[in-house]
Image: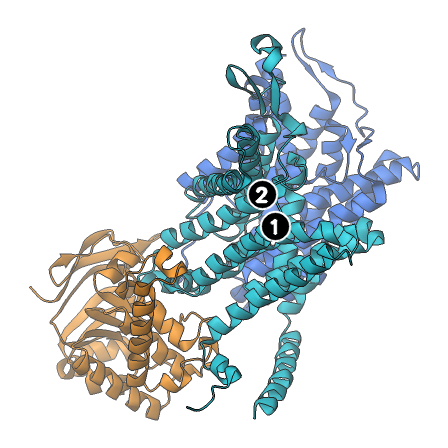
């Protein structure tokens, strides 16, 4: 396989990371917390689609819709039950709660679906594109890149042009001021979680189509890596999440190809550490001055 | 050269020049006031002096030692202690432990000596306990020494912050709005306490205040800050009667 | 001379010393009685087998509480340090099995070396992340925990008459090994076998006491106050002349040392495979800490004992164990931050207090 093909699949993987990272960065910017459970929402979304397709024999488009709906509801429920009551609490408490939610989702999935990985039937029916004798791009890769690009464009437009989107920006800048301006802060935060979770569902489906296996732990590593991507690109910045995600996917894939597949994870973590040491706010992040 | 010599320090936040060409000279043992309307940059000046922010120009010297560019920890070790506009106590520690935290650098027993309870630990802990109670007595807080800092009433919390700052054995004490939220009685008591601290501990004090009664009552000299720059400097009486100062506070 | 009332004497002692003594006594009494019951054969082998693990889980919980409760930072890679200690200590014992046949020399050395290596790892990890806080620190420690596990899972060590052979890829190239004297030391995911089972109950309890002694004394000292000051208000701590980096390092090193020590005890008690020191274990220990009370060392001891024993004794529990831990974490956090619950707890405390005061009078 050539460098180009590794690059392309790296972009594809990176797009999925970008989708997940968007959820992290939006919640971090607007609700000021790290939603540790986000990675596992991906897994739930994938399982919802899986169940809809396998158990209920529903068509692909319906299954995906169900997956998105399930995740949106899950995200909203989690926010209302576990995170909202802790809005004034110490960051440590919030973090521990988020870990609890993540753990809960993983173990529920373990109980329901068992511990062995299942085969996930790819939702993509597009045939591979034989570019030339060296390069063949799979249908999944193409769909992933196209879908994520479209979503990112739509999301950017939504945030910048629509009223609820601009409300999200306002809340991320200054929650108190936003409230005083008449913005429904609770609703905005709920919307953020809903959108993030919907994206997670899409990411889950794409991830499991690209790497056609699903288990209770499917979301954990991609979740961590997507968070790394969000930090890499600048936490709180939407374009940052996109750039961070794609770059990370490329770095990971090229590491797998040219260095070692075992060490690729180590390299990704090393990237995070380096970033945090050199420019903690990430590529596109801005330095937030703590009020003393 | 004065005891505290601040020369042309400044800092910008984004496009805003928060403090510009700020100069200050304070003599040893003086009680000095930094006043100005809200948002003038007074706390920012404190943050520049204590290393929380790094000035992008200028120099800060205390007792001949150049403190410019040092970290907050180094600056405290070199003699500047402060209180904060929004009280920053160690809420889960007792009153006495808050003060003993301030005494941290006045003691030298190592981690091992502490763990193994060697004689140096015992000696220094005993001395710390004594010293802490002594300091608390000055501020009439010794009765509450075992109370959790977060359970103190507001006025006592402000006083505790000052005790903790004094415990670090500073040369210069910075008080950021020490009378905020106090009623006239408490303020009068605070005025006496600050003057007592200056006399008893031979302390040099720079304070930020909005309460003009306190400022005119105990400060010998003032600097007025407006929009990040020095408006007027001089002795209290002259400054407070200066028409520009009055305009700055009250508007046209 | 007036007769001294021992209770009055106890009452005049510092509350911190009182608390520590109570904790020591609780440990000694619990394990003392349990030990006697085991000796006299009054309890089944199920309970007996729990006693030593309880000890190393206590050590894990107490050392994690130092980081989470006293320093106020969340570390999600604690199992990684236990892993380092277990492997280093275990391999040391395995290699010196013949050279140092006296257990009472070899085992303490193994514990020391295992602990120190874990502490070294704590420094290696701690230094680059010293400036990180909160969420970032948590993720990085999680990452490190996973990295340690993955790295150990991929190490193969074989010894023969020529010495040790390392490989990261696969069972070491057979051609380079003198098959006659070959001995597998570390077999990747299959880990180490043949570590002498040196951990006895009284050694484990002794280690618990040492851990408690060091950590409780550290907390009740000038360094402990500084660490808690950093937890309560980092900016004020700096302004008070307290070095954040120095004290963070003290915490990382101490916490990881004892986690490594716990690992050595584990390795010399039951079989170790890298997969056991995973994220699940780090979360398990975190549950102990949260349930026992963040910052409450005695609470960690109690929680570790009860929460470790409970699922083992209630077999039907097994499948739902981790699910219940997850729910416990969430519920504890919600309760601890709920004003009504805090008032309720204080009210309970007052009721108990009033009774004690009445009795003393």
As drawn, the chain in cyan is: C
Q: Report the residue at 83% width, 44% height from top.
A: A66
Label 2 close to label 1 by CB (< 8 Å): yes
The reply, left or right, for residue B231 in relation to residue C168 is left
Q: Is C24 on the left or on the right of A214, as rendered?
A: left
Please tell me the numbered disc located at residue C263. 2
The picture's colour for chain B is orange
* Residue C123, x across and y down, in percent: 43, 42
In the image, residue B200 sits, relative to residue A16, either above or below, namely below
Please tell me in which quadrant of the rendered image residue C305 appears.
bottom right
Chain letter behind tag 2:
C
Kind of element beneath mark 2: helix
Give the x, y percent position of residue A12. Answer: 65, 27
Locate the N terminus of chain C by quadrant.
Answer: bottom left
* Relative image position of residue C51 (x, y in whole percent): 68, 53
Q: Viewer-proximal residue, C202 or B134? A: C202
Residue A237 visible in the current orientation: no
Task: Looking at the image, tell me whether mark 2 or mark 1 is earlier in sequence order.
Answer: 1
Q: In this view of the protein, which residue sits in the foreground, A45 or A160?
A: A45
Classify residue B137 by image quadrant. bottom left
Residue A6 located left or right of residue A276: right
Q: Colour of chain A?
A: blue
In the rendered view, tell whether residue A260 sits above or below residue A152.
Answer: above
The residue labelled by disc 1 is C56
Horizontal and vertical percent position of residue A130 = 71, 12
Question: Which residue is located at x 44 percent, y 62 percent?
Answer: C217
């Amino acid at each position: 396989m050539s460098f180009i093909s590794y690059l392309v699949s790296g972009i594809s993987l990176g797009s999925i990371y970008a989708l997940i990272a968007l959820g992290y960065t939006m919640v971090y910017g607007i609700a000021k917390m790290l939603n540790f459970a986000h990675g596992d929402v991906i897994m739930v979304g994938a399982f919802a689609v899986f169940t809809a397709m396998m158990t209920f024999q529903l068509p692909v488009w319906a299954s995906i819709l169900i997956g998105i709906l399930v995740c949106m509801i899950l995200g909203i429920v989690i926010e209302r039950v576990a995170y909202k009551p802790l809005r004034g609490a110490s960051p440590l408490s919030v973090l521990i709660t988020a870990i609890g939610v993540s753990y809960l989702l993983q173990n529920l999935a373990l109980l329901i679906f068992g511990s062995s990985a299942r085969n996930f039937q790819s939702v993509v029916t597009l045939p591979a594109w034989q570019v030339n004798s060296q390069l063949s791009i799979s249908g999944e890769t193409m769909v992933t890149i196209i879908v994520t690009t479209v979503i990112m464009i739509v999301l950017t437009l939504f945030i910048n042009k629509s009223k609820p989107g601009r409300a999200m920006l306002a809340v991320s800048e200054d929650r108190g001021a936003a409230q005083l301006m008449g913005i429904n802060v609770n609703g905005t935060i709920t919307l953020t979680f809903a959108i993030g979770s919907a994206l997670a569902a899409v990411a889950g489906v794409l991830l499991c189509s690209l790497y056609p296996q699903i288990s209770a732990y499917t979301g954990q590593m991609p979740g961590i890596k997507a968070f790394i991507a969000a930090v890499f690109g600048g936490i709180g910045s939407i374009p940052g999440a996109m750039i961070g995600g794609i770059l990370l996917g490329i770095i990971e894939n090229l590491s797998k190809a040219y260095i070692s597949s075992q060490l690729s994870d180590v390299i990704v973590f090393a990237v995070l550490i380096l970033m945090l040491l050199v420019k903690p706010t990430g590529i596109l992040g801005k330095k937030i001055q703590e009020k003393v | 050269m004065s005891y505290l010599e601040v020369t042309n320090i400044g800092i910008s936040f984004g496009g805003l020049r928060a403090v510009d060409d700020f100069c200050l000279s304070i003599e040893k043992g003086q009680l000095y006031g930094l006043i100005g309307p809200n948002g003038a940059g007074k706390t920012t000046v404190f943050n520049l002096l204590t290393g929380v922010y790094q000035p992008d120009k200028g120099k800060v010297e205390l007792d001949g030692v150049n403190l410019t560019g040092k970290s907050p920890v180094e600056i405290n070790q070199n003699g500047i202690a402060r209180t904060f506009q929004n009280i920053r106590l160690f809420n889960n520690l007792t009153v006495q432990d808050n003060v003993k935290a301030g005494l941290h650098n006045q003691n030298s027993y190592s981690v091992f000596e502490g763990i193994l309870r060697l004689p140096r630990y015992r000696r220094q802990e005993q001395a710390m306990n004594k010293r802490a109670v002594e300091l608390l007595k000055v501020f009439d807080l010794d009765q509450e020494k075992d109370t959790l800092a977060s359970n103190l009433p507001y006025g006592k919390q402000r006083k505790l912050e000052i005790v903790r700052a004094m415990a670090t054995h500073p040369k210069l004490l910075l008080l950021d709005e020490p009378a905020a939220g106090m009623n006239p009685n408490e303020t009068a008591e605070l005025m006496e306490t600050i003057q007592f601290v200056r006399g008893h501990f031979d302390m040099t004090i720079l304070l930020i205040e909005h309460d003009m009664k306190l400022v005119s009552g105990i400060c010998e000299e003032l600097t007025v800050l407006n929009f990040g720059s020095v408006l007027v400097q001089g002795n209290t009486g002259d400054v407070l009667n200066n028409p520009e100062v009055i305009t700055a506070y009250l508007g046209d | 001379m007036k007769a001294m009332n021992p209770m009055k004497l106890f009452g005049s002692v510092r509350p911190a010393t009182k608390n520590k003594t109570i904790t020591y006594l609780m440990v000694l009494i619990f394990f003392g009685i349990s030990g006697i019951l085991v000796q006299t054969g009054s309890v089944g082998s199920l309970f007996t087998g729990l006693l030593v693990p309880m000890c190393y889980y206590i050590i894990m919980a107490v050392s994690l509480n130092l980081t989470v409760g006293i320093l106020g930072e969340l570390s999600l890679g604690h199992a990684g340090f236990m892993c380092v200690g277990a492997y280093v200590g275990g391999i040391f014992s395995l290699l010196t099995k013949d050279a140092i046949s006296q257990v009472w020399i070899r085992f303490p050395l193994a514990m020391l070396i295992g602990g120190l290596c874990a502490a070294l790892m704590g420094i290696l990890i701690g230094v680059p992340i010293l400036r990180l806080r909160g969420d970032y620190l948590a993720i990085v420690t999680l990452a490190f925990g996973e990295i340690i596990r993955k790295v150990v899972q991929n190490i193969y060590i074989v010894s023969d008459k020529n010495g040790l052979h390392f490989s990261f890829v696969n069972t070491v190239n057979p051609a380079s090994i003198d098959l006659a004297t070959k001995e597998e030391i570390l077999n990747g995911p299959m880990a180490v076998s043949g570590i002498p089972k040196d951990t006895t109950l009284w050694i484990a309890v002794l280690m618990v006491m040492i851990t408690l002694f060091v950590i409780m004394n550290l907390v009740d000292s000038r360094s402990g106050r500084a660490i808690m000051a950093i937890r309560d208000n980092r900016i004020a701590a700096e302004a008070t002349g307290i070095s954040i980096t120095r004290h963070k390092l003290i915490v990382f090193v101490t916490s990881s040392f004892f986690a490594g020590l716990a690992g050595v005890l584990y390795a010399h008690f039951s079989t170790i495979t890298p997969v056991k020191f995973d994220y699940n274990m780090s979360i398990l220990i975190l549950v102990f800490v949260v349930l026992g009370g963040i910052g409450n060392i005695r609470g960690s001891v109690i929680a570790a004992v009860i929460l470790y024993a409970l699922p083992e004794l209630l077999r039907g529990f097994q499948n739902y164990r981790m699910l219940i831990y997850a729910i416990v974490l969430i519920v504890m956090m919600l309760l601890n931050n709920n004003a009504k619950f805090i008032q309720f707890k204080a009210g309970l405390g007052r009721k108990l207090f009033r009774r004690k005061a009445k009795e003393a009078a």
